[in-house]
Each structure stands twice: as C-alpha cells, then as structure tokens.
Image (spheres, rainbow, N blue to C red):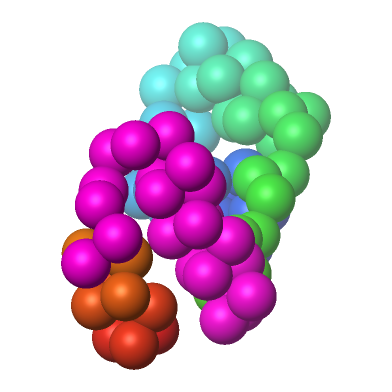
Amino acid sequence: MRRLRDAAKNPWWILISFVPFIGGIVLLIFYLSPSRTKKLPMTLQDRLSEVEDLLKKGTIDEEEYKYMRNKS
C-alpha cells in the first residue's frame, strides 16, 4: 500500500491482486512506476515573482499589483 501511495495510486488497487494473472501484472506495473514528486508550498519570494511576472505581461495593472503584493 505504501508503494501505491508513493506512485500516486489509490491503495484500493491492492484488491486487483485477487484477479488471477492480470492483477499481478497490473500491480507490478504500478510498483515499477516512478514516484510522484512532492510539491513544496510556495515561498513568499516565489509568490512575489509570480505577481511581478503578471505585471510584466500586462495581465494585471499597477493597482492590482500593489494589492496582490500587500496581500502576499
């Protein structure tokens, strides 16, 4: 179950092992699949740079930029 969670699969997939032959192959594929990457929460600097990028692209204006910067 731990490996299934690490591969971003629902642990209930373990029940497929009761299906002869096919279940074992499916689980083997899941076990060999790469682990998912863990997303870390965005830092304040990341959020500020994201808002600055929006301003540079023209998606937001100066007033919205100031509001979003104060909100972060």
Task: Using the image as rendered, state which of residue 45 and residue 7 is in the foreground.
Answer: 45
Which residue occupies 21% across, 67% down? 63
Q: Nearer the viewer, residue 32 or 27?
A: 32
Residue placed furthest toward the top: 22
User: Is residue 14 visible to the viewer in this orientation of the structure?
Assistant: no
26 left or right of 69?
right
What residue is rendered at 24% in x and 77% in y? 67
Name the side, left or right, on which 7 lies relative to 9.
right
> Could you tell me which residue is drawn at 50 percent across and 57 percent down?
52
43 part of magenta stretch: yes
- Residue 62: where, in percent of width, then height? 30, 60
User: Residue 27 in magenta?
Assistant: no
Looking at the image, residue 2 lies above or below residue 14 = below
* Label total for image: 0
* Horizontal arrangement in the rendering, residue 43 relative to residue 63 (left or right): right
Q: Quadrant of residue 30?
A: top right
Q: Residue furthest front?
A: 62
Residue 50 visible in the current orientation: yes
- In which quadrant of the rendered image does the C terminus lie? bottom left
Q: Is residue 41 above or below residue 60?
A: below
State whether the magenta stretch is mostly helix, strand or loop.
Answer: helix
Q: Position of residue 2 (x, y in %)?
A: 63, 62
Q: Which x, y percent locates residue 14?
A: 47, 44
Give the position of the N terminus as an image quadrant: bottom right
Tell me which segment is drawn in magenta. Answer: 42-63
Q: Quadrant location of residue 66?
A: bottom left
